[in-house]
Amino acid sequence: MRVKGSTLLVAAALATPLLALVAVLATSSWVQALVLWPTGLVTATAVLAPPRWRLPVVAAGGLVAGSTFWLVDVPHGAALGFGAATTAQAFLAQLVLCRGWRGPRPGLRDQHDMGRWILASFAGAALGTTVLGVVVTVDGWRFDLGQVVMVLLAGVFSQLLLVLPFLELDAAAPGVSQLERGGQWVATVASTAAAFGIQDSAYWAFLTVPFLAWGALRLPLREMVLQLLVITVTVLTLGSVGIGPLGFDQAGDAAVETATVLHLFLIGGVLLVVPYALVSQQLRRRSAEAHREGELVRRIMDSATRTAIIATDRAGRITLVNVGAENLLGYRGDELLGRTPEVIVPRGEIQSQAEALGTAPSFVKIAKVLARNPAEPRDWRLRRKSGEVRSHSMVLTPMTDEAGAVAGYVLTSEDVTARVQRQESLLAALLSEREAVERLEQADRMKDALVSTVSHELRTPLTSILGYATMLADGDFGDLDGPAEQMLDRIIKNGERLRSLVENLLVLARVNAGHLEVDAHVLDLRDVVRSAQEVVVPSLVARDLDVRIRLPEGPALVDGDAGMLERVLLNLLTNALKFTPDGGRVDVVVGVEDEEVVMDVSDTGLGIPLEEQDQLFTQFFRSSVAKKEAIQGTGLGLSIAHSIVEQHGGVIGATSEAGAGSTFLVVLPRLTEAAATARGWAPTEVDPAAQGLEIVGGPPPPYERGRTRPA
C-alpha cells in the first residue's frame, strides 16, 4: 500500500522531536545520545515538505538538535555545534536528493537514484561533522579523531537508514510464499538477537548477513527497509543498555570505539541489503516485463492460426513453432523443436531453391542469401507430417542481436496451394487458348491464301466469259432473237455480280494480309464522284428514284488513290440504291471545310436496326433487314470501305433508323490548293450535268438533317 507524502511528512515531523527526546533522556552520555539521535529524520522531513518550507524545516531540526543536546553533559557551545551540524547535514542531503532546493520528492528505483542517495548521506554527514568540529574547536572542547570518525559514521548511518522509508520505492510484489517470508523474518530477527544479545563475541555479528542477503534477494525493497529498521532498533537498544558484544553504555573512548564499530556494521548492512534488493527488484521487474512481452508475442503468434511462424537459431535449429505452423504442417511444436527445417522441406525443393539462388543446397546457406532481401516472398513446397506436399508463400527474415550480428531466422508462410493450382490451371488454359488461336490464325491465313488464289483463278475465265457475252450482245456474231437476248442479258448481269465479288475478295485478302497499298496522288474528290456516277447510271434506268449529287463549286482536294476512293463511294452508293425502294431518294453531298473534305451518302430506304449498327463494318455482316427482304450482297462492301478510308487517314461512320433510311459520312484530310499546285496539280473544267443525274452546284451544308460526324 502506497502512503501519501503528506502523511509521511506529518509522521516524520512528529517522530523527529520525540525520538530526539528519547535519545537524550534515555541515555547518560553524549555518545549514546549522538548514536540514537535521528538526524536522518530532519532530512526526510525537509524532503517531504513543500519547497518553500524546506529551509524552515531544516532550521527547526537544527534547533531541536541543539536544544536536546543541552540536556546531556556537553558544553553549550558543543550543543550549538550539534544543532548547526544537524542543519548543515540535512540541508546538503536534501539538496542532493531533490536535485536542487525546489526539486520533487526523490525516489529509489535504479542505480542513479541509489548513487544520489549514498552521495547525499556521505556528503551531508561529512559537512555536518566539519561544522561540528569547527564549532566545538572554537568553543574549546576537546574533539579527537576517534570522536570525529564516530560522529561521521553516525551521521552517515542516520542519513542512509532514516531517509529510506520516505523515498518513493517501487511496490513490486515478488512471488514469495508466506512460509518463506515468515522463515526469513524469523531467521533474521533470531540471528540478530543471538549475535547481539546472547553472547559477547563481535564475530557473531556476521551471522545475520546471510539472512539479510536472503531477504534482499527474495523480498521487496520496502519490506527489507522495514527489516533494517527492526534490526537497527534491536541492535541500538541492546547496545545502549550494554547488552552484547557492541554495548556502548560505558563512558570515554571505549564507548566511542564501540559505537564506531557498531555503525560500521550497520552501514555495511544497509549498503549490502539496499543495492542487492534494488538490483533484485529491477531484475524481477524486467523479468516480469519480458515475461509479459513474451506472452503477448506468444498470444499474437498463436492467434495467427492460418499463418505458420517458425524461428530458428543461427545454425538453423528450430526454436519456436506457433499454432499456425502446427495447423498447416500437422506437427506438434515439440516434434519440431531442435530440428532443422529440412524435416518439412523436401530435398528436391531445397535443391531447386539453392539452384535458383546460386548457393549450396543447405537451409543455412539459402537463409543467408534470402536474408539480404527479407521482404520478398517466395513460393516453397513444404511437406506435412502426413507426407502431403503443399505450396507455401514464405518470407524469411533475419533476427539480429544487440551487436547487429545474425542470431537466427524467422520463417513466415501461408498455404497458397489453392492459388498455385488456380495459376497452373489458368496457365494451362492460356497455353491451350494460345494454341487454338495459333491454329485459327493458321487456318485464317490458309483461307485468305485460298480465297486469293481462287479469286485470281476465277478472274481470267470470268473476264473471258463476260467479254464474249458482251460481243454476243453487241451483235458481233449476228442478231439474236428475243429469248436468247434476255438470257444473254442475265448472263452478263450475273457475270458482273460475280466479277464484283471476285474483286471484293481480292481486296479483302490484301486487307487481311496488311498489303492494301494506296497509290496516293493529288485528286479532286469531285472527279471521283463523277466517275462513280457513270458506273451507276445504267442501273437506274429501270428504277423510280430521285438521285441527287451536290458538289462544291471549288475543288475538294485530297491525297489519295482514285480507284480505291471510287470503290468506297460505289459501295456506299450501290447499298443506298439497293436498300431504297422506288419512289425514294438518294443524296450524295461533298463538302469542304478548313482541314477536311466530307462526303455524305444518305437515303430514305429501309434503314438498319439500332442494335446492329455497331457491326456494320464487320466482314461478312448482313443486317436482318437485308436477309428479310432477300436483298443480294456479300457483307464485304462496308468492311472494305472502312479499311480503305482508314488507309487514307480518314474516318467513316453511319447513323440510321429502321424504316427511316441511313446516312454514311466519310471524312478525309484536305489538301490546300497551294500544296496541291506545288505537287503539279492543275484544275480541269468538267460539265457536272451528265447522263440524266441531277447535279446541284453551290456550297452545300455538310451536316444537315441532324447527321453526326463519325468518331
Image: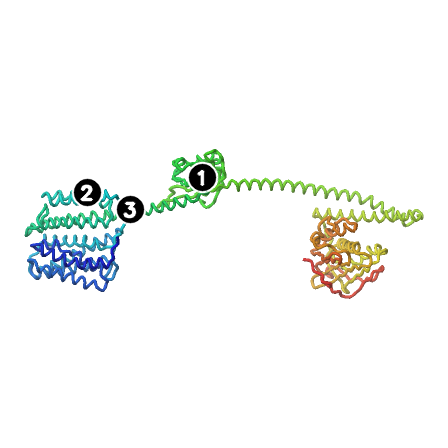
Residue at left offset 70%, top offset 47%: 512
Residue at image mark 2: 210
Q: Residue furthest bottom?
A: 698
Q: Are marks 2 and 1 in contact (CB under 8 Å)?
A: no
Residue at image mark 1: 327
| 283 vs 530, nearest the viewer | 283
Looking at the picture, which amino acid does disc 3 mark? Arg
**Left or right placement of residue 5 versus residue 610 in this view:** left
**Left or right placement of residue 422 versus residue 597 in this view:** left
Q: Residue furthest front?
A: 178
Q: Is residue 472 visible?
A: yes
- Looking at the rendered structure, the secondary structure element under dot 3 is helix
Q: Nearer the viewer, mark 1 or mark 3?
A: 1
Q: In the rendering, at what x and y percent does residue 60 appear? A: 16, 62
- Is 276 situated above or below 540? above
Residue at image mark 3: 284
Q: In the rendering, at what x and y percent does residue 320 appear? A: 39, 40
| 331 vs 591, nearest the viewer | 331
| 165 vs 201, nearest the viewer | 165
Along the polypeptide, which appears first: circle 2 or circle 3? Answer: 2
Looking at the picture, which amino acid does disc 2 mark? Pro
